[in-house]
């Protein structure tokens, strides 16, 4: 017992207490900062998620939202990689056939569709026609390997705002998208030449058609229009303040010049050749 007391007397009780107290302080400090760090991490993660959500909303509402419609996956991947690095462009989806284009525009806010002319299930021309009827605010930029006047004119007549070829470069693609987004039309150089050639051919055909017929006098044109409106000889005479004989003279002249057999033939030929405009 005396040995135990002698050993115990060698300990400094103040140091023991100090050690324990400091130990408690150290442990308390560890738990406090651990809790604080965990709390800050949670706030950081929450803010990051909210910022990401806000950024997505801003993209979805204020950027140019684009849908890519083409049945070649590699081509779509290439287009999307070009658009993804542009700060004002946002790809909302991709479609590989005509019917899915119509489904996607119901689910997403779409500003521009990069539309292949040849799509399975429903051609690009048919899709463009439906979009123009149901969603007139959506702008269509046709993309195709074909530069034939028939393809170009048909899809433009059905509401497309632009037409570029698939060999178009990155810069021209971006210019085309932004031009159409601003409300203007865009055609690649080759397509523009095709359109101009088509217009020139139409003019040539029109001039040939006009040259085929002898020139009609002003009075003959007036008589022809009234015949097309089913006026009788007497009604034509009364309307133009001319005699019945004069009306018959003009009618005979029209039959001869237009190579028609009767009034029905006159009207048919006049309509086919835009002589009533």
Image: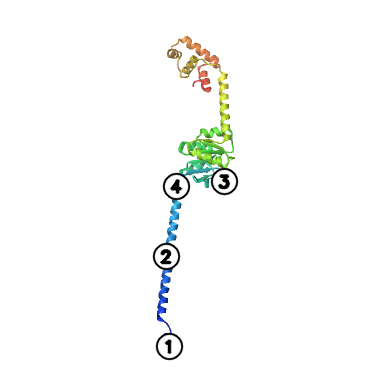
Is residue 255 visible in the rendered image? The answer is yes
Q: Identify the element where label 2 is drawn.
A: helix
Which label lies toward us, 1 or 3?
1
Q: Which residue is drawn at 56% across and 31% down?
A: 195
Is residue 91 visible in the rendered image? The answer is no
Q: Residue lying furthest bottom in this view?
A: 2
Q: Which residue is drawn at 43% across and 60% down?
A: 40
Q: Which numbered disc covers residue 71?
A: none
Give yes or no for contact between labels 1 and 3 (Cβ–Cβ under 8 Å): no
Give yes or no for contact between labels 1 and 4 (Cβ–Cβ under 8 Å): no
In the rendered structure, which disc, 2 or 3, sits on the residue that comes first in sequence? Answer: 2
In the rendered structure, which disc, 1 or 3, sits on the residue that comes first in sequence? Answer: 1
Which label lies toward us, 1 or 4?
1
Alpha carbon distance from label 2 to label 1: 45 Å
Q: Identify the element where label 3 is drawn.
A: helix
User: Mark 4 sits on what residue?
Assistant: 58
Few, some or many residues within 10 Å of mark 4 (<14, 14–19, 20+): few
Q: Quadrant of residue 1?
A: bottom left
Q: In which quarter of the image is residue 149?
A: top right
User: Mark 1 sits on what residue?
Assistant: 6
In the rendered structure, which disc, 4 or 2, sits on the residue that comes first in sequence? Answer: 2
Left-right relation of 40 to 252: left
Q: Which numbered disc covers residue 35?
A: 2
- Which of the pair 266/44 is nearer the observer? 44
Q: Position of residue 93 (x, y in %)?
A: 50, 46
User: Mark 3 sits on what residue?
Assistant: 78
């Amino acid at each position: 017992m005396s040995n135990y007391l002698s050993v115990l007397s060698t300990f400094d009780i103040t140091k023991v207490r100090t050690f324990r107290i400091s130990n408690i302080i150290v442990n308390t400090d560890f738990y406090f900062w651990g809790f604080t760090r965990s709390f800050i991490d949670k706030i950081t993660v929450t803010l990051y998620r909210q910022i990401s959500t806000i950024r997505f909303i801003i993209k979805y509402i204020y950027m140019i939202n684009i849908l890519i419609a083409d049945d070649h996956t590699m081509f779509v991947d290439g287009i999307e990689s070009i658009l993804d690095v542009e700060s004002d462009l946002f790809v909302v989806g991709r479609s590989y056939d005509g019917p899915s284009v119509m489904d996607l525009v119901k689910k997403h806010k779409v500003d521009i569709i990069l539309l292949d002319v040849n799509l399975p299930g429903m051609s690009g021309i048919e899709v463009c026609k439906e979009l123009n009827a149901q969603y007139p605010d959506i702008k269509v930029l046709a993309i195709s390997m074909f530069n034939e006047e028939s393809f170009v004119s048909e899809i433009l007549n059905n509401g497309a705002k632009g037409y570029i070829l698939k060999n178009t470069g990155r810069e021209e693609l971006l210019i085309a998208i932004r031009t159409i987004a601003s409300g203007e039309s865009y055609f690649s150089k080759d397509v523009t030449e095709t359109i101009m050639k088509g217009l020139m051919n139409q003019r040539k055909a029109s001039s040939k058609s006009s040259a085929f017929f002898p020139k009609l006098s002003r009075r003959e044109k007036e008589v022809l229009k009234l015949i097309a409106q089913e006026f009788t000889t007497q009604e034509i005479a009364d309307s133009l303040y001319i005699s019945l004989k004069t009306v018959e003279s003009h009618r005979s002249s029209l039959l001869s010049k237009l190579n028609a057999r009767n009034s029905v033939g006159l009207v048919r030929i006049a309509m086919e050749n835009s002589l009533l405009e």
